[in-house]
């Protein structure tokens, strides 16, 4: 299983708008991805309610993971989105 640890770049954390941006990107990635705070159970990254339920704040670390074959590229793109607080998923890493 591939995983990336990343610090949340959105000042407001994964709440409301940033969570929606992240969930859309995770859904569009086309492979199953989970997200978790360290020391907590992972949740489906494509579920807005699950991501909001994490209560992840800006500056906190989260763990993105996937068991898919092409997970490395997907996780790199999602990690860049989260760490830089981008408005949309980058086309390339």
Image: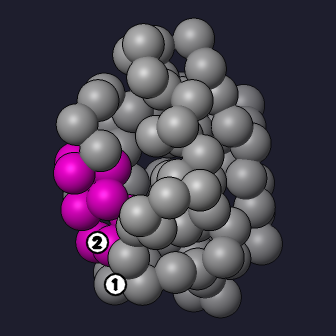
Quadrant holding the C terminus: bottom right
Quadrant holding the N terminus: top right
Magenta portion: prevailing SS class: helix
* Residue 85, image x, y percentages: 58, 80
* Mark 2 residue element: helix
Q: Nearer the viewer, residue 81 or 51?
A: 81
* Residue 17, image x, y percentages: 34, 84
Q: Residue drawn 61% across and 20% down?
A: 2
Q: How many labels sit on residues? A: 2
| Residue 15 seen in the current view | no
* Residue 50, image x, y percentages: 31, 48
- How was the colour assigned to the protein in this rendering? one colour
Q: Can you identify the residue that label 2 sits on?
A: 20
* Residue 83, image x, y percentages: 68, 67
Name the mark on residue 5: none
In this rendering, is residue 46 above or below 3? Answer: below
Q: Can you identify the residue that label 1 sits on?
A: 17
In this rendering, is residue 21 above or below 79? Answer: below
Q: Is residue 44 left or right of residue 67?
A: left
Q: Residue drawn 28% across and 72% down?
A: 20
Q: Which residues are magenta?
A: 19-28
Q: Nearer the viewer, residue 28 or 21?
A: 28
Other residues around mark 1 within 10 Å, as few (<14) / some (14–19) / many (≥20):
few
Q: Is residue 19 left or right of residue 36?
A: left
Alpha carbon of mark 1 to alpha carbon of mark 2: how far? 5 Å
- Report the residue that reaches farthest toward the front: 92
In this rendering, is residue 87 above or below 69? Answer: below
Asked where in the image residue 75 lies, by quadrant, the reply is top right
Q: Nearer the viewer, residue 82 or 80?
A: 80
Check if residue 22 falls in the magenta segment.
yes
Q: Residue drawn 39% across and 16% down?
A: 68
């Amino acid at each position: 299983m591939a995983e990336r640890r990343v610090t949340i770049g959105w000042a407001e954390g994964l709440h409301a708008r940033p969570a929606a941006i992240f969930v859309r990107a995770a859904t569009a990635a086309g492979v199953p991805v989970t997200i978790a705070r360290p020391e907590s159970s992972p949740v489906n990254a494509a579920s807005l309610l699950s991501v909001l339920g994490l209560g992840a704040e800006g500056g906190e670390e989260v763990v993105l993971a996937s068991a898919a074959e092409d997970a490395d590229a997907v996780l790199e793109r999602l990690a860049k989105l989260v760490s830089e607080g981008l408005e949309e998923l980058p086309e390339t890493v």
